[in-house]
Structures are given as C-alpha cells and as structure tokens.
Amino acid sequence: MTESIPLDLPIRPAFWNVPLWGEVGVYIVGILAVILCAVGVVKNVRRWRAGRAASAARDPKRVERLMREAVAQEKVRETVPGKIHAVLVLGFFLLFLGTATATLDWDVGHYVFGSQFLKGDLYLFYKLVLDTAGVAVLVALALGAWRRWCTPSNLPRDRRFVWVYASLAFIVASGFVVEALRLAVQRPAWADFSPVGSVLADIFIGWGLSNASLESTHVLLWTVHGLAALAFVAAIPLTYYAHIYRTPVSIALPRGEAGGVDEKIEAIEEQEHFGWSTAGDLPRSARIQADACTECGRCEAVCPAMRAGTPLAPRAFVMKLRELAAASPETALSERISAEELFACTTCGACARVCPADIEIPRLIVQMRRHLALECGEFPEGAAAALENTASVGNPWGLDPYERLDWAEGLDVPVAEEGASYDVLYWVGCAASYDRRARRIARSMVKILKRAGVSFAVMAEERCHGEFARRLGEEYLYQTAAQENIENFAKYRFKRILAACPHCFHTLKNEYPQFEGGKFEVVDHASFIRELIDAGRLPDMSDREARGGLTVYHDPCYLARLNGVASAPRTVLSESGQKLVEPREFGALSFCCGAGGGQMWCEGRSAKKPVNVIRLEALRATGATTIAAACPHCITMLESAKSTMKDADELRIEDIAEIVARSLPDEE
Ligand code: SF4
Ligand code: SF4
C-alpha cells in the first residue's frame, strides 16, 4: 500500500522521469561499486598487515583524538587552506548523508512502510541543506584549485589532482543540472528551496526548451551523474581519495603519553637486527602512516632541515616510504632514502605537530637511523666522536668526568648523599656542566634555588642521559646510559628531578619510564621558577626595567612543542621585568635552533643556510635586543649564529635562568 499524496505537498520525487532500467541499474551498479570499494580497502589493509603488528601500547586518547582531528578536523582547520578543506569535507559529508537519507526514504520508507518521510517542511529543509552543501563543495574546490595552480604554493600539481578536482566538481555540478532539468518540467511551488536548481531551471525555461527535450536530457545526465558518483565510490581505495579512510586510521594509531618518545628496543643484547633496513622491516604502523599522507606539504613548510636546504624533504620522505612499503620485502630502504636525508633531521617534531594525518616522521627516521648506527656504524661526521666520548667518559665532549662539578666552584653546591632527602635533585646536564658558556645557566639556577630556599642537591654520578645518542640511532648507548643513571637515582631520596635542559627534561620525564624503576617526577626549570614566583619564594623583580629594550623568547622544540611548556617561561620573563615580543613562529609552532636529533654534534652538514642562522634572523626581525631561551643547546646554536653576523655585537642571548638570576634584587 502506498500513500496518496496531495498535489500541494512537497515530497521527494524519487526516480522522477527515470525508466525502470535506470531504477534497477542504479542498484546493480551501486552494489558493484560498493563491492569494488570494499575489495580495494581489504587489499589495502592486507598490505598494511604484511608488516609486523605495532607494539601493544595502550592509548586511551585514540577515540578522542579521532573525534578531534578526523571528525572535527581541528588540526586541519589551523590554516586558511585547511579551513577551506574542512568546508569541503563538511559539504561532501552532507551530500553523502543526503544520498543515504534519500535511499532510506525510498527503499525503507516507501517500499517497507508505504510512506516516504522526506516530505513537507522536512523535505524543504533537506533540499535547502543539500543545495547549500553542493555550493560549499564547489566554492571550496574552486579555491583549492586556485591555490594549487595559480599561487606559488608547495602543493603537487600533477594530473592526479586535475582528476581529483574535476571529478568531484563534475559530480556536484551535474547533480545541480539534473535537479534543474526536473524543476524546469515540474515547476513546483517550492522550487526556491533548491536555489541553485531553481536558478538553472529558469535559465533552461528561458531557452524555450520543450518538456520532451528537458526530460530526455534529464535521463541522459541522470545516468552519467549516477555512474560518475558510483565510479567515485569504487575508485576510493585506488586514488588520492583513499586518504578519506587512511588518514583517520593513522590518527587512531596508538601513541605514547607524550610526543617525541622513541620506541624502546626490548632485550637489546639479544637482538641481531636493529631498526629498519628493508621494506620487509616496515611495521604496520609505518605502512599505515606512509599511506595516510595527503601530500598537503605542511610538514615541508615548517621543516628546518628543508628550509636550510638539506636533502631532507619530509613529504618526499613519506612518499618514498609509501613506495617502499609496496615493494618486495627485500627491497633496501637505502634504494630510495639516503643516509644524508636521514641524518639531516633535527627531530624537532614540527612536521608531526602540523601533519593532519599525525605522521610521526622523526620517529620513522630514528628507526632507519638505528639500522645505520647499530648495524653499519654509520654516523654523520663529528657525531661518532661525541658518541664514543659519551660511552667512554659519560659526556660528548670527552672531558674528564672528575671535572663535571667544576662549574659549581665557589658556590657551595650540595652534593646528594645517601640517606639524606631533598625536595629537588638538580640534574645539571652535560652542557651546563662542561660548556664554558652554558655553565652560567647552572650557576644562575643555583643562585635561584638558594635564594628561594629550596632543599636541593646535585648528583656526583651524573652522566649524559644519552638522548642525543638515541636520536642518532645509537639505542644501545642510550640504554646503557639510562640504566646507569636510573641505578644512581635509586641511591638518593628526592621528590622531584629539576632539569634546565629540555632534552634532559624530555628524556628523563617521558623516556626513562620505559625502563624498570625509571619513573620519576621531573620538572623543567621554566615551570619550576614560575612555581617559585607564584609561591612568593622569590623577591619581586617586576619593577626592573628590561635591559636594552625588547626581549624575544625562543621556544625550544623539546619544551614547547613536545611538552607543551610555553606559557611558564613567558610568565617568568614578564615577572623578571622583560618586555616581550613574539617572533613569527613561536610556542608549539616554534622553529628549531638546529641542535636536536644529534645535529649539535654533526659537522659539515650540507645546508645552504644553517638552521641556527635562519632562526636567529627571524628572532632579530622582531626588533628585540635580548633573545631569551630555556635550553643550553639553543643558546649555543644562537650564539654560534650570532658570531657569523657582523652587526650583532649588542645582541644579548640568555637563558631564562640567567635573566631571573640577574634580575633578583640584592639580598639585604
Ligand atoms: S622532525 Fe623537524 S627536521 Fe625532522 S623532518 Fe620533521 S620538521 Fe624536519
Ligand atoms: S606527512 Fe603529513 S604534513 Fe606532510 S604532506 Fe603528508 S599529510 Fe601533509
């Protein structure tokens, strides 16, 4: 039984003017398209499953991340082109939802219950929403195409993308024309609820086309539109559109608590093969991530290695990885990816931060470095000596371990004793222990700690924590160093470890917990000093004039980006009387100083313009006369860049601890 429909009731006209072959054909071709799509997806998943399973890391935030990044497109919307893409996705989703609703309206409503539900006001609302969504998709496609082909963007322009834009535009535009041809014949009183179709219908009527020619054109175009839409569905896994499902899968991959944590090689002494050297070594997670790349180029826009002109281009790296993942298992990764590319990465994490598919490029790079380091003994020039020094005497400079505490001369710094207990174990780090310039940071920290009356001590057995070794792929040295430090920590009683170097802070806080007994409460010096200020444990410094004008704060990657510490150092600087100005790239989107990933120890890199010089130029462009940082390595890199500039003598480069220490009023 079907309902009788009053003539003045708006209702969705299913299969209007479509002959029976069309109605039957759309179901047959539709089912075929869905089957082809499903087969393609299954084949894709099989390719992923050819890699070993990812470690069974628990990640309770996966669903939340999926909702934020894949559904709400939070990361995508961070840029203007991303906002346009989000409009495209929303419009496309509404059109898909509209088609699904129409199918339910006819196949379930009409055939099963004998009554369509898309009628009356609901139908008019439905029409208005779908017309608006179609317009949004076309506008977004036009803007996207303009950006890709008419502006100097870094987006690929090959034929694939012509098809991507043309096919989507054709499906939506032909849908409008099909609708208009129907409206031109039917001329319903509610045609204005399909504004685009209605305008086009008026044009067709204006051309004086007969109903017969409108109807025959309608059938023809309805068929072409339907075939194009279903071909689109079938082609999803084989084309660029595959990112529709691949990117969300990548986003949902389990991640650690913090970003920038490298996977631990368990039972490293028993292993015979380290890292990835062939296509067969690529695990599932790497295959998924390589497949998920949308080629948006955001990673390349923020990559310091790329901006410096090194051979590393993160998007190209991921594309090569995608090809390798599809190659035979014995294919050497070195056939497509060179050691020079791999060792150019500063592991700054900027690419991963902006990537809409959450591809962890530095983590992938470190896995490949592991093979070079542990199986081939291949390191960049300079790095090998730093690693050997760390292995033999516990610091990359190769200086006498008995001189480690020389920085504290005359300061009466307490050295941790077994049985005693301290609020804070001050982890000085190699740079502030040995580097003449960086020692001023350690001395400043001691002045602050003493002034605030903090119960603290340093550890005589401190040695390099091995973070730079881990990033260079020398996981064995890292694990040896980590275990030794953890054993030494266990001798002393303290509430927290205080680290004034973001690399020390990151690895002690986020990576040492991978070892038994390695979980400690660790605080960075910016947050710690802020705590002291907030608790009133330091005297008021705010009335101190900023020396020499403005101060710009350079966010260290391992502090701001990987650990979200960006506001504390700014508060500390403001409380110390500094007038702050921001550079173009700051906070979580800061630009690297060029030291991370072991680059600090690499010599003779093939950069056109060194990363530290690029960063210093950007910081100076703010007009600041003082550059503040919260990392001894950043200070070293920026000082080194300054030494290459002729007109930079007046520029001050200081750690926040130094600024606070010199801003403290004299004790009465
Ligand atoms: S981690 Fe930094 S240097 Fe390495 S590829 Fe990403 S953006 Fe480039
Ligand atoms: S790796 Fe990420 S940021 Fe880079 S091109 Fe691919 S999707 Fe875009």
Image (spheres, rainbow, N blue to C red):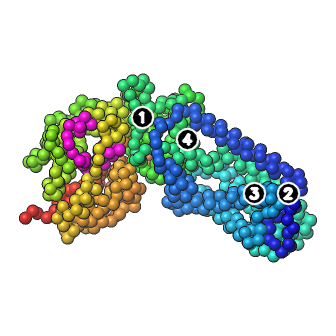
Q: Nearer the viewer, mark 2 or mark 4?
A: 4
Distance from label 2 to label 4 (Cα)? 41 Å
Q: Which residue is mark 4?
A: 288
Pointer 1 with pointer 2, Cβ within 8 A: no
Q: Which residue is mark 1?
A: 369
Q: Which residue is mark 2?
A: 220
Pointer 4 with pointer 3, Cβ within 8 A: no
Query: Which element is circle 3 on?
Result: helix
Given the image, on which type of amino acid does mark 2 rest?
Answer: Leu
| Ligand 2 within 8 angstroms of badge 3 C-beta | no
Which numbered disc flags the more N-terminal residue, 1 or 2? 2
Please determine whether, in this image, residue 2 is positioned above or below residue 524. Answer: below
Q: Which residue is mark 3?
A: 104
Q: Residue at x 34, y 51 (%)?
A: 559
The magenta segment: 485-510
Which numbered disc flags the more N-terminal residue, 4 or 3? 3
**How dense is the environment of label 2, judged by Cα within 10 Å: few (below 14), some, or many (20 and up)?**
few
Q: Nearer the viewer, mark 4 or mark 1?
A: 4
- The percent position of residue 580, horizontal first and vertical second, equals 30, 65
**How dense is the environment of label 4, judged by Cα within 10 Å: few (below 14), some, or many (20 and up)?**
many
Distance from label 3 to label 2 (Cα)? 24 Å
Residue 257 on the magenta span? no
Given the image, on which type of amino acid does mark 3 rest?
Answer: Leu
Residue 188 falls left or right of residue 142? right
Q: Residue at x 35, y 49 (%)?
A: 558
